[in-house]
């Protein structure tokens, strides 16, 4: 039960245009005692939610209509560098992964995923708080 305490003060905003992906992430995160404070279907609404709520972590889809995930990542990290961002994607394309890492992403979650993969990715993203 130590792990549940570890996530006690973690809040998450999920930004993904896919309803099923958002629902799966929400269910997995809540099952671990992580508070999902907002969800957004697009980058613009997502950035607004992150600005308003200042979550611990953002689960951010890479491929979205209008504003893509890499651009959203850049906006979030420029304005709120302390917010962790976990990229969620079906693409393991090297350029996309590199752009996410260079943009300040704290982790990468590749679809399809299961509960264990989600939680392991969240742990990695949250543990990266140590300064280099």
Image (tube, rainbow, N blue to C red):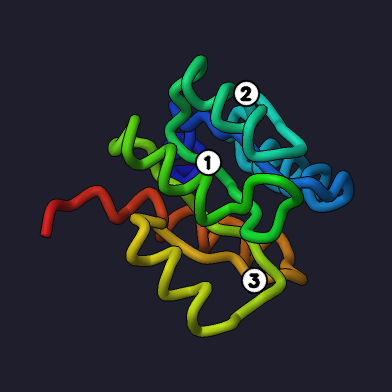
> How far across and how far down the image is residue 2, in percent?
44, 43
Q: Residue under circle 3?
A: 110
Q: Count neighbours of disc 3 (C-alpha within 10 A) and say few if under 14, some if 14 to 19, many if 20 or more.
A: some
- Residue 88 lies in what quarter of the image? bottom right
Q: Residue under circle 1?
A: 58
Residue at (83% x, 43% y) in the render: 23
Q: Is residue 100 left or right of residue 81?
A: right
Residue at (47% x, 28% y) in the render: 55
SS for dot 2: strand
In the rendered view, tell whether residue 114 sits above or below residue 47.
below
Residue furthest out toward the front: 66
Gap in Å between the C-alphas at discs 1 and 3? 15 Å
102 or 83, nearer to the observer: 102
* Label 2 with label 3: CB-CB less than 8 Å: no
107 or 16, nearer to the observer: 16
Gap in Å between the C-alphas at discs 2 and 3? 22 Å
The mark that comes first in sequence, 1 or 3, is 1
The mark that comes first in sequence, 2 or 3, is 2
In the rendered view, tell whether residue 3 sits above or below residue 116.
above
Residue at (34% x, 31% y) in the render: 79
Residue furthest out toward the left: 132
Gap in Å between the C-alphas at discs 1 and 2? 10 Å
The mark that comes first in sequence, 1 or 2, is 2
75 or 12, nearer to the observer: 75
Q: Count neighbours of disc 1 (C-alpha within 10 A) and say few if under 14, some if 14 to 19, many if 20 or more.
A: many
Residue at (41% x, 54% y) in the render: 125
């Amino acid at each position: 039960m130590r792990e549940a305490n570890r996530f006690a003060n973690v809040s998450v905003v999920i930004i993904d245009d896919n309803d099923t992906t958002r629902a799966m992430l929400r269910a997995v995160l809540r099952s671990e005692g992580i508070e999902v404070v907002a969800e957004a279907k697009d980058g613009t609404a997502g950035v607004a939610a992150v600005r308003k709520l200042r979550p611990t972590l953002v689960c951010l889809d890479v491929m979205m209509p209008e504003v893509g995930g890499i651009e959203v990542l850049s906006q979030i990290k420029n304005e709120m560098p302390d917010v962790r961002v976990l990229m969620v994607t079906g693409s393991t394309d090297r350029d996309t992964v590199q752009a996410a890492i260079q943009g300040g992403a704290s982790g990468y979650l590749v679809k399809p995923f299961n509960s264990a993969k989600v939680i392991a990715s969240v742990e990695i993203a949250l543990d990266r708080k140590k300064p280099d």
